[in-house]
Image: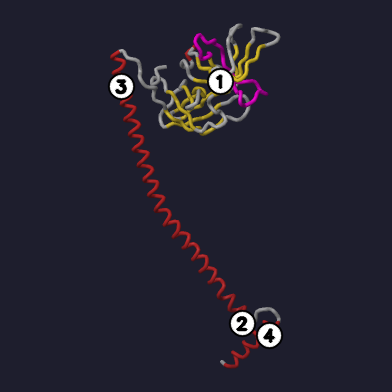
Amino acid sequence: MIAIAVVFTLAQHRARGGGRMSPPERAARAVVWPLQSVLVSGGRVAHNMSIAAWRGRYLVEENERLEREVSHLETERMRMYTYYLENKAIRQSLGWPASEPPPQVSARVIDWSPGGQRRRITIEANRSLETGNVVRTGGGLVGRLVEAQGTRGVVVLLTDAEHAVAARVQRADGDHGIVYASPAGTTRRLALQMTKLPQNADVRVGDRIVTSGLGGVYPKDLPIGVVERVERSEVNVAAITAYIRPFADFDHLDFVLVDRRGESGT
C-alpha cells in the first residue's frame, strides 16, 4: 500500500509539473464526474419544482379569489339590469320618459382588419350581440355591428372608406350633412370629413358634430367629433367640407361599449 501510494504521489507531482492531470486523477474524475452531474442537475430540478409548487399554491388561491370576485360582480350587474328593466316598465306604464341611460355591454377588441381603406374590428362581449348594434367608447361613436355570431361580432368603423353617417351640427337649427372617412393624405388627427352640407351652411371650427338620426341607422345625438377645419371649394362655392377630429380614439381601441337593440329604445 505504501509503495502504491508513493507511485501515485510521484505520478501526481510529475503530472502537476507538466501542467496536466495524472492517470489516477483522470480515472477518478471519469468515475465521479457523471455522478456529480446527475446530482447537480437533480438538485436544480428539485429546487425549481419546490419554488414552482410554493408559488403555484398562491397562484391557485389568487385565481380562485379573482373568480369569486368576477362571479360576484356579474351577479351584481345582472341584479342592476333587472332593476333597470323594472324601472323602465314602471315609468312606461306611468307615461314617464326614461330617467337614466340604457344599459350597455362592454366588449374587448380581439382583432383588426388588415390595412387599406376597409377599417373593421372584431369584438367579443360577455353577452350575445346582434347585427346593427351601435358601438362606441366613452368619448364618442365608433361604428356599428355588421356581422354578429353569439358573443362575437365585426364592427365597421366610422373611418371605413365605405361607411357613411347622417350627421348634424350640434346647435339650434344646426345644418345636416354626411360624415365619411377623410381621403388618403389627410392627417390622422382629422380622420373624418362632413360633406353634403347646404350651400349656405353655417359650420365653424369648434362645432360639435353628432348623429342626426336620419335613415334609422344610428340613434339621434350620438357624439362623433369636433370640427377643426372648414374648406369651401373655389370651383363650386356650394361645396363645403368640414374636417373632423373624432372623439373616439381609433388608434387605440381596446375596449368598447355596445348598445344592444331593444335595450336602448332605438
- The amino acid sitting under disc 2 is Pro
Residue 219: % across, % down: 46, 16
Vertical placement of residue 170 versus 22, above or below: above
Residue closer to the observer: 64 or 43: 64
Query: Disc 4 or disc 2, which is closer to the eye?
Result: 4
Badge 3 density bin: few <14, some 14–19, many ≥20, Cα 10 Å? some
Q: Earlier in the sequence, mark 4 or mark 1?
A: 4
- What's the distance in space between the residues labelled 3 and 2, CA to CA? 93 Å
- What's the distance in space between the residues labelled 4 and 1, CA to CA? 91 Å
Q: Is residue 173 left or right of residue 190?
A: left
Badge 2 density bin: few <14, some 14–19, many ≥20, Cα 10 Å? few
CB under 8 Å between discs 3 and 2: no
Q: Which residue is mark 4?
A: 14
Residue 181: % across, % down: 60, 20
Query: Disc 2 or disc 1, which is closer to the eye?
Result: 1
Query: Disc 3 or disc 4, which is closer to the eye?
Result: 3
Residue 67: % across, % down: 37, 42
| Callout 1: SS | strand
Q: Which residue is mark 2?
A: 24
Residue closer to the observer: 157 or 213: 213
